[in-house]
Amino acid sequence: MPAYKIAVLKGDGIGPEIVESAIKVLKGVEHLSGHSFELEEGLIGGVAIDQKGEPLPQETLDLCLKADAVLLGAVGGPKWDNLPTSKRPERGLLEIRKALDLYANLRPAKVYEPLIGASPLKEEVVRGTDFIVIRELTGDVYYGEPRGIFLEGGKRIGINTMRYTEDEIRRVVVKGFEVAMKRRKKLTSVDKSNVLEVSGLWRDVVEEERKNYPEVEVEHLYVDNCAMQIVRRPSSFDVIVTGNIFGDILSDEAAVITGSLGMLPSASLGERYALYEPIHGSAPDIAGKGIANPIATILSVAMMLRYSFHLEKEAKAIERAVELVLEKGYRTPDIYSEGCLKVGTKEMTDAIISSLEEAWQSF
Ligand code: NAD
Protein backbone atom coordinates (compact mmCIF):
# COMPACT_ATOMS: atom_id res chain seq x y z
CA MET A 1 0.00 0.00 0.00
CA PRO A 2 1.53 3.38 -0.95
CA ALA A 3 2.15 5.86 1.87
CA TYR A 4 0.04 9.02 2.04
CA LYS A 5 2.36 12.02 1.85
CA ILE A 6 1.67 14.77 4.37
CA ALA A 7 3.44 18.12 4.49
CA VAL A 8 3.66 19.21 8.13
CA LEU A 9 3.87 22.94 8.87
CA LYS A 10 3.98 23.47 12.64
CA GLY A 11 4.26 27.27 12.60
CA ASP A 12 4.46 29.43 15.72
CA GLY A 13 3.31 29.62 19.35
CA ILE A 14 1.46 26.44 20.37
CA GLY A 15 1.67 25.22 16.74
CA PRO A 16 4.56 22.80 17.33
CA GLU A 17 3.00 21.35 20.52
CA ILE A 18 -0.42 20.63 19.06
CA VAL A 19 0.91 19.31 15.74
CA GLU A 20 3.19 16.91 17.64
CA SER A 21 0.10 15.62 19.46
CA ALA A 22 -1.83 15.17 16.22
CA ILE A 23 1.10 13.29 14.69
CA LYS A 24 1.20 10.92 17.68
CA VAL A 25 -2.50 10.17 17.14
CA LEU A 26 -1.86 9.63 13.42
CA LYS A 27 0.86 7.12 14.36
CA GLY A 28 -1.75 5.36 16.49
CA VAL A 29 -4.04 5.16 13.45
CA GLU A 30 -1.15 3.86 11.38
CA HIS A 31 -0.63 1.09 13.91
CA LEU A 32 -4.30 0.09 13.97
CA SER A 33 -5.16 0.41 10.29
CA GLY A 34 -1.98 -0.68 8.52
CA HIS A 35 -1.99 2.46 6.37
CA SER A 36 1.21 4.44 6.34
CA PHE A 37 1.75 8.16 6.39
CA GLU A 38 4.95 9.82 5.23
CA LEU A 39 5.55 13.13 6.97
CA GLU A 40 7.85 15.93 5.85
CA GLU A 41 8.22 19.24 7.67
CA GLY A 42 8.35 22.76 6.25
CA LEU A 43 8.55 26.27 7.68
CA ILE A 44 5.70 28.78 7.67
CA GLY A 45 4.85 31.98 9.54
CA GLY A 46 7.09 33.75 12.03
CA VAL A 47 9.56 30.90 12.28
CA ALA A 48 9.98 31.05 8.48
CA ILE A 49 10.49 34.82 8.63
CA ASP A 50 13.21 34.32 11.24
CA GLN A 51 15.00 31.57 9.33
CA LYS A 52 14.30 32.38 5.68
CA GLY A 53 13.21 36.02 5.64
CA GLU A 54 9.66 35.38 4.38
CA PRO A 55 6.47 33.82 5.79
CA LEU A 56 6.04 31.27 2.99
CA PRO A 57 9.42 30.23 1.55
CA GLN A 58 9.39 28.67 -1.93
CA GLU A 59 10.72 25.36 -0.55
CA THR A 60 7.71 25.11 1.77
CA LEU A 61 5.36 25.75 -1.11
CA ASP A 62 7.16 23.13 -3.23
CA LEU A 63 6.82 20.62 -0.38
CA CYS A 64 3.06 21.29 -0.17
CA LEU A 65 2.62 21.00 -3.94
CA LYS A 66 4.19 17.50 -3.82
CA ALA A 67 2.14 16.33 -0.83
CA ASP A 68 -1.26 14.60 -0.76
CA ALA A 69 -2.34 16.88 2.09
CA VAL A 70 -0.98 19.61 4.35
CA LEU A 71 -1.25 19.69 8.16
CA LEU A 72 -0.76 23.14 9.67
CA GLY A 73 -0.52 24.29 13.30
CA ALA A 74 -0.88 28.07 13.60
CA VAL A 75 1.12 31.17 12.76
CA GLY A 76 1.79 34.57 14.28
CA GLY A 77 2.73 36.15 17.57
CA PRO A 78 3.68 39.45 19.19
CA LYS A 79 7.28 39.15 17.99
CA TRP A 80 6.19 39.85 14.41
CA ASP A 81 3.26 42.19 15.08
CA ASN A 82 5.12 45.34 14.05
CA LEU A 83 6.13 44.09 10.62
CA PRO A 84 4.28 45.58 7.62
CA THR A 85 1.13 43.60 6.66
CA SER A 86 2.80 42.15 3.56
CA LYS A 87 5.62 40.65 5.69
CA ARG A 88 3.58 39.32 8.63
CA PRO A 89 3.33 35.59 9.48
CA GLU A 90 -0.40 35.62 8.65
CA ARG A 91 0.53 36.61 5.08
CA GLY A 92 2.00 33.10 4.73
CA LEU A 93 -1.46 31.66 5.34
CA LEU A 94 -3.15 33.85 2.74
CA GLU A 95 -0.40 33.01 0.25
CA ILE A 96 -0.59 29.26 0.75
CA ARG A 97 -4.39 29.26 0.44
CA LYS A 98 -4.08 31.18 -2.81
CA ALA A 99 -1.17 29.12 -4.17
CA LEU A 100 -2.92 25.80 -3.49
CA ASP A 101 -6.21 27.30 -4.74
CA LEU A 102 -7.98 26.26 -1.53
CA TYR A 103 -11.29 27.89 -2.19
CA ALA A 104 -13.55 26.11 0.31
CA ASN A 105 -12.95 26.26 4.05
CA LEU A 106 -14.99 23.74 6.03
CA ARG A 107 -15.44 24.55 9.70
CA PRO A 108 -17.56 22.15 11.72
CA ALA A 109 -19.26 23.58 14.81
CA LYS A 110 -20.27 20.63 16.94
CA VAL A 111 -21.37 20.74 20.55
CA TYR A 112 -20.20 17.74 22.55
CA GLU A 113 -22.69 16.68 25.22
CA PRO A 114 -20.00 16.40 27.97
CA LEU A 115 -18.96 20.02 27.22
CA ILE A 116 -22.43 21.46 26.88
CA GLY A 117 -21.99 23.48 30.07
CA ALA A 118 -19.01 25.30 28.50
CA SER A 119 -21.23 26.97 25.93
CA PRO A 120 -22.19 30.55 26.74
CA LEU A 121 -25.69 29.67 25.48
CA LYS A 122 -28.40 27.91 27.49
CA GLU A 123 -28.17 24.14 27.29
CA GLU A 124 -31.63 23.78 25.79
CA VAL A 125 -30.69 26.18 22.99
CA VAL A 126 -27.33 24.67 22.12
CA ARG A 127 -28.01 20.95 22.64
CA GLY A 128 -27.64 18.92 19.43
CA THR A 129 -25.80 21.67 17.54
CA ASP A 130 -23.84 20.13 14.71
CA PHE A 131 -23.30 22.24 11.62
CA ILE A 132 -20.58 23.13 9.15
CA VAL A 133 -19.74 26.60 7.92
CA ILE A 134 -18.30 26.54 4.41
CA ARG A 135 -16.44 29.77 3.87
CA GLU A 136 -15.18 30.80 0.44
CA LEU A 137 -11.48 31.34 0.92
CA THR A 138 -9.71 32.82 -2.09
CA GLY A 139 -11.87 35.75 -3.18
CA ASP A 140 -13.87 38.62 -1.70
CA VAL A 141 -12.65 41.78 -0.06
CA TYR A 142 -9.42 40.13 1.16
CA TYR A 143 -8.09 39.78 -2.38
CA GLY A 144 -10.07 42.26 -4.53
CA GLU A 145 -8.25 45.10 -6.29
CA PRO A 146 -7.87 48.04 -5.96
CA ARG A 147 -6.75 47.92 -2.37
CA GLY A 148 -4.55 50.19 -0.30
CA ILE A 149 -4.35 53.55 1.40
CA PHE A 150 -4.32 56.42 -1.10
CA LEU A 151 -4.28 60.20 -0.97
CA GLU A 152 -7.37 62.02 -2.17
CA GLY A 153 -7.46 65.80 -1.88
CA GLY A 154 -4.60 65.67 0.62
CA LYS A 155 -6.52 63.21 2.87
CA ARG A 156 -5.91 59.46 3.25
CA ILE A 157 -8.51 57.07 1.91
CA GLY A 158 -8.53 53.33 2.67
CA ILE A 159 -9.87 51.07 -0.06
CA ASN A 160 -10.68 47.35 -0.30
CA THR A 161 -12.79 45.84 -3.02
CA MET A 162 -15.47 43.16 -2.62
CA ARG A 163 -15.30 41.08 -5.78
CA TYR A 164 -16.52 37.65 -6.88
CA THR A 165 -16.74 36.07 -10.32
CA GLU A 166 -19.67 33.75 -10.90
CA ASP A 167 -17.31 30.78 -11.29
CA GLU A 168 -15.74 31.49 -7.90
CA ILE A 169 -19.19 31.58 -6.33
CA ARG A 170 -20.41 28.49 -8.17
CA ARG A 171 -17.61 26.15 -7.15
CA VAL A 172 -18.00 26.86 -3.44
CA VAL A 173 -21.79 26.75 -3.63
CA VAL A 174 -21.58 23.36 -5.36
CA LYS A 175 -19.26 22.20 -2.55
CA GLY A 176 -21.96 23.36 -0.13
CA PHE A 177 -24.63 21.31 -1.88
CA GLU A 178 -22.33 18.25 -2.02
CA VAL A 179 -21.55 18.41 1.69
CA ALA A 180 -25.26 18.94 2.49
CA MET A 181 -26.13 15.82 0.46
CA LYS A 182 -23.85 13.78 2.75
CA ARG A 183 -25.40 15.28 5.87
CA ARG A 184 -28.95 16.36 6.74
CA LYS A 185 -29.61 17.92 3.32
CA LYS A 186 -30.14 21.50 4.45
CA LEU A 187 -28.17 24.41 3.01
CA THR A 188 -28.24 27.97 4.34
CA SER A 189 -26.70 30.51 1.96
CA VAL A 190 -25.62 33.74 3.63
CA ASP A 191 -25.22 37.08 1.87
CA LYS A 192 -26.06 40.77 2.09
CA SER A 193 -28.01 41.02 -1.13
CA ASN A 194 -30.23 43.80 0.16
CA VAL A 195 -27.29 46.21 -0.23
CA LEU A 196 -24.43 44.52 -2.10
CA GLU A 197 -24.43 43.69 -5.82
CA VAL A 198 -21.80 41.00 -5.22
CA SER A 199 -24.29 39.31 -2.89
CA GLY A 200 -27.05 39.61 -5.50
CA LEU A 201 -24.92 37.59 -7.88
CA TRP A 202 -24.16 35.10 -5.07
CA ARG A 203 -27.87 34.53 -4.47
CA ASP A 204 -28.58 34.13 -8.21
CA VAL A 205 -25.91 31.41 -8.49
CA VAL A 206 -27.33 29.53 -5.48
CA GLU A 207 -30.77 29.63 -7.10
CA GLU A 208 -29.31 28.29 -10.39
CA GLU A 209 -27.50 25.43 -8.63
CA ARG A 210 -30.35 24.36 -6.37
CA LYS A 211 -32.09 22.88 -9.43
CA ASN A 212 -29.32 20.26 -9.52
CA TYR A 213 -29.94 19.27 -5.90
CA PRO A 214 -33.73 18.97 -5.53
CA GLU A 215 -33.39 16.99 -2.29
CA VAL A 216 -31.59 19.82 -0.53
CA GLU A 217 -33.69 22.33 1.37
CA VAL A 218 -32.30 25.83 0.69
CA GLU A 219 -32.58 28.83 2.99
CA HIS A 220 -31.21 32.33 2.25
CA LEU A 221 -30.26 34.55 5.17
CA TYR A 222 -28.75 38.03 5.33
CA VAL A 223 -25.50 37.92 7.25
CA ASP A 224 -26.74 40.10 10.11
CA ASN A 225 -29.82 37.89 10.56
CA CYS A 226 -27.68 34.74 10.33
CA ALA A 227 -25.42 36.07 13.10
CA MET A 228 -28.55 36.35 15.29
CA GLN A 229 -30.01 32.97 14.30
CA ILE A 230 -26.75 31.19 15.14
CA VAL A 231 -27.24 32.17 18.78
CA ARG A 232 -31.03 31.74 18.75
CA ARG A 233 -31.42 28.39 16.99
CA PRO A 234 -27.96 26.89 16.37
CA SER A 235 -29.19 23.31 16.22
CA SER A 236 -31.39 24.12 13.20
CA PHE A 237 -28.39 24.61 10.88
CA ASP A 238 -26.75 21.86 8.87
CA VAL A 239 -24.51 23.46 6.22
CA ILE A 240 -23.96 27.21 5.94
CA VAL A 241 -22.24 28.44 2.78
CA THR A 242 -20.98 32.00 2.47
CA GLY A 243 -18.26 34.34 1.22
CA ASN A 244 -14.84 34.94 2.71
CA ILE A 245 -15.44 37.87 5.06
CA PHE A 246 -18.92 36.83 6.26
CA GLY A 247 -17.62 33.29 6.79
CA ASP A 248 -14.63 34.57 8.74
CA ILE A 249 -16.90 36.27 11.25
CA LEU A 250 -19.72 33.68 11.39
CA SER A 251 -17.36 30.75 11.87
CA ASP A 252 -15.75 32.47 14.86
CA GLU A 253 -19.21 33.08 16.28
CA ALA A 254 -20.01 29.40 15.70
CA ALA A 255 -16.76 28.51 17.49
CA VAL A 256 -17.75 30.48 20.58
CA ILE A 257 -21.14 28.80 20.98
CA THR A 258 -19.51 25.37 21.06
CA GLY A 259 -17.58 26.32 24.18
CA SER A 260 -13.97 26.23 23.09
CA LEU A 261 -11.83 27.38 20.25
CA GLY A 262 -9.44 24.56 21.15
CA MET A 263 -11.99 21.95 20.01
CA LEU A 264 -12.62 23.07 16.43
CA PRO A 265 -10.88 21.68 13.36
CA SER A 266 -11.02 22.91 9.78
CA ALA A 267 -10.36 21.75 6.25
CA SER A 268 -9.49 23.97 3.31
CA LEU A 269 -10.21 22.21 0.06
CA GLY A 270 -9.41 22.90 -3.58
CA GLU A 271 -9.74 20.67 -6.65
CA ARG A 272 -6.24 19.21 -6.21
CA TYR A 273 -4.88 20.27 -2.82
CA ALA A 274 -6.11 20.30 0.76
CA LEU A 275 -4.92 21.83 4.00
CA TYR A 276 -6.06 20.94 7.51
CA GLU A 277 -5.62 23.15 10.55
CA PRO A 278 -7.29 24.09 13.82
CA ILE A 279 -9.46 27.19 13.75
CA HIS A 280 -7.64 28.86 16.60
CA GLY A 281 -4.45 30.89 16.36
CA SER A 282 -1.00 30.40 17.84
CA ALA A 283 -2.15 31.29 21.42
CA PRO A 284 1.13 33.00 22.38
CA ASP A 285 -0.24 33.51 25.92
CA ILE A 286 -0.01 29.77 26.65
CA ALA A 287 2.75 28.68 24.24
CA GLY A 288 5.39 26.43 25.79
CA LYS A 289 3.35 25.82 28.97
CA GLY A 290 2.19 22.34 27.98
CA ILE A 291 -1.49 23.22 28.49
CA ALA A 292 -2.72 23.82 24.92
CA ASN A 293 -5.75 21.81 23.91
CA PRO A 294 -4.63 19.53 21.05
CA ILE A 295 -8.16 18.34 20.13
CA ALA A 296 -8.80 20.82 17.29
CA THR A 297 -5.62 19.70 15.55
CA ILE A 298 -6.32 16.03 16.23
CA LEU A 299 -9.81 16.45 14.75
CA SER A 300 -8.21 18.24 11.78
CA VAL A 301 -6.29 15.03 11.15
CA ALA A 302 -9.61 13.15 11.24
CA MET A 303 -10.92 15.53 8.57
CA MET A 304 -7.77 14.88 6.52
CA LEU A 305 -8.37 11.14 6.69
CA ARG A 306 -11.99 11.65 5.59
CA TYR A 307 -11.71 14.29 2.88
CA SER A 308 -8.25 13.67 1.40
CA PHE A 309 -7.70 9.95 1.91
CA HIS A 310 -11.33 8.72 2.10
CA LEU A 311 -10.47 6.70 5.22
CA GLU A 312 -13.88 7.05 6.88
CA LYS A 313 -13.40 4.37 9.54
CA GLU A 314 -10.07 5.88 10.60
CA ALA A 315 -11.60 9.38 10.75
CA LYS A 316 -14.54 8.14 12.82
CA ALA A 317 -12.20 6.27 15.18
CA ILE A 318 -10.34 9.49 16.01
CA GLU A 319 -13.60 11.40 16.51
CA ARG A 320 -14.98 8.65 18.74
CA ALA A 321 -11.72 8.47 20.74
CA VAL A 322 -12.05 12.21 21.44
CA GLU A 323 -15.65 11.73 22.59
CA LEU A 324 -14.65 8.83 24.85
CA VAL A 325 -11.93 10.90 26.52
CA LEU A 326 -14.37 13.76 27.11
CA GLU A 327 -16.91 11.30 28.53
CA LYS A 328 -14.20 10.03 30.90
CA GLY A 329 -13.77 13.59 32.18
CA TYR A 330 -10.38 14.59 30.76
CA ARG A 331 -10.13 18.37 30.23
CA THR A 332 -7.37 20.78 29.28
CA PRO A 333 -7.66 24.08 31.22
CA ASP A 334 -9.55 25.87 28.41
CA ILE A 335 -12.47 23.41 28.69
CA TYR A 336 -12.11 22.54 32.37
CA SER A 337 -15.06 22.57 34.73
CA GLU A 338 -15.48 21.58 38.38
CA GLY A 339 -15.24 17.84 39.04
CA CYS A 340 -13.34 16.99 35.85
CA LEU A 341 -9.79 15.81 35.49
CA LYS A 342 -7.52 18.71 34.56
CA VAL A 343 -4.74 17.57 32.21
CA GLY A 344 -2.08 19.09 29.97
CA THR A 345 -1.46 18.62 26.26
CA LYS A 346 0.55 15.42 26.70
CA GLU A 347 -1.90 13.70 29.04
CA MET A 348 -4.84 14.60 26.80
CA THR A 349 -2.99 13.23 23.76
CA ASP A 350 -2.03 10.01 25.57
CA ALA A 351 -5.63 9.54 26.75
CA ILE A 352 -6.92 9.90 23.19
CA ILE A 353 -4.37 7.41 21.90
CA SER A 354 -5.35 4.97 24.67
CA SER A 355 -9.01 5.29 23.63
CA LEU A 356 -8.27 4.83 19.93
CA GLU A 357 -8.29 1.06 20.02
CA GLU A 358 -11.64 0.94 21.84
CA ALA A 359 -13.00 3.39 19.28
CA TRP A 360 -11.55 1.38 16.39
CA GLN A 361 -13.17 -1.84 17.64
CA SER A 362 -16.56 -0.13 17.90
CA PHE A 363 -16.87 0.30 14.12
P1 NAD B 1 -5.83 32.64 19.41
O1 NAD B 1 -6.78 31.70 18.80
O2 NAD B 1 -4.40 32.31 19.23
O3 NAD B 1 -6.11 32.75 21.00
C1 NAD B 1 -7.34 33.23 21.54
C2 NAD B 1 -7.51 32.69 22.97
O4 NAD B 1 -7.84 31.31 22.91
C3 NAD B 1 -6.24 32.78 23.81
O5 NAD B 1 -6.57 33.06 25.14
C4 NAD B 1 -5.63 31.39 23.71
O6 NAD B 1 -4.85 31.03 24.81
C5 NAD B 1 -6.88 30.52 23.58
N1 NAD B 1 -6.59 29.33 22.78
C6 NAD B 1 -6.46 29.27 21.42
N2 NAD B 1 -6.19 28.01 21.03
C7 NAD B 1 -6.14 27.28 22.15
C8 NAD B 1 -5.88 25.89 22.40
N3 NAD B 1 -5.62 25.02 21.42
N4 NAD B 1 -5.89 25.47 23.68
C9 NAD B 1 -6.18 26.31 24.69
N5 NAD B 1 -6.42 27.63 24.53
C10 NAD B 1 -6.41 28.10 23.26
O7 NAD B 1 -6.16 34.09 18.85
P2 NAD B 1 -5.40 35.47 19.07
O8 NAD B 1 -4.92 35.57 20.49
O9 NAD B 1 -6.31 36.48 18.51
O10 NAD B 1 -4.15 35.42 18.10
C11 NAD B 1 -2.84 35.03 18.51
C12 NAD B 1 -1.96 34.97 17.28
O11 NAD B 1 -2.41 33.95 16.40
C13 NAD B 1 -1.94 36.27 16.47
O12 NAD B 1 -0.64 36.49 16.01
C14 NAD B 1 -2.89 35.96 15.33
O13 NAD B 1 -2.60 36.73 14.18
C15 NAD B 1 -2.61 34.51 15.09
N6 NAD B 1 -3.71 33.77 14.45
C16 NAD B 1 -3.33 32.76 13.62
C17 NAD B 1 -4.30 31.98 13.03
C18 NAD B 1 -3.86 30.83 12.19
O14 NAD B 1 -2.70 30.48 12.18
N7 NAD B 1 -4.76 30.19 11.47
C19 NAD B 1 -5.65 32.18 13.32
C20 NAD B 1 -6.01 33.21 14.20
C21 NAD B 1 -5.02 34.00 14.78
Image: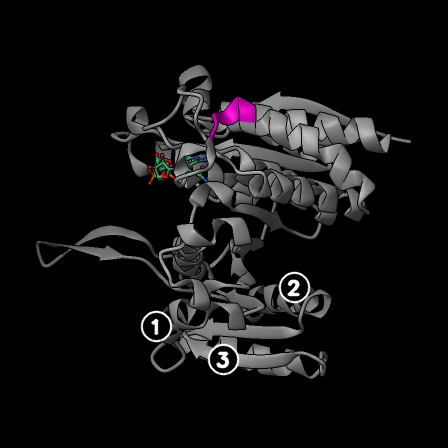
Q: Can residue 362 be seen in this view?
A: yes
Residue in the picture at 8% in, 54% down:
154
Q: Mark 1 points at which residue?
A: 224
Disc 3 residue type (three-letter): His
Relative side of 267 to 75, left or right: right
Q: Nearer the N terminus, badge 1 or badge 2?
A: 2
Of the pair 81 and 141, the residue shown nearer to us: 81
Of the pair 300 and 42, the residue shown nearer to us: 300
Quadrant where the N terminus is found in the figure: top right
Q: Name the residue under label 3.
A: 220
Q: Using the numbered discs, state the Cα–Cα distance from disc 1 to disc 2 in whole angstroms.
A: 23 Å
Q: Residue 1 carries which label?
A: none
Secondary element at tag 1: helix
Q: Nearer the N terminus, badge 3 or badge 2?
A: 2
Tell me where the magenta segment starts and ends, as one range. Answer: 342-347
Mark 1–mark 3 CB contact (< 8 Å): no
Q: Name the residue under label 2.
A: 175
Quarter of the displayed picture in which ligand 1 can be seen: top left
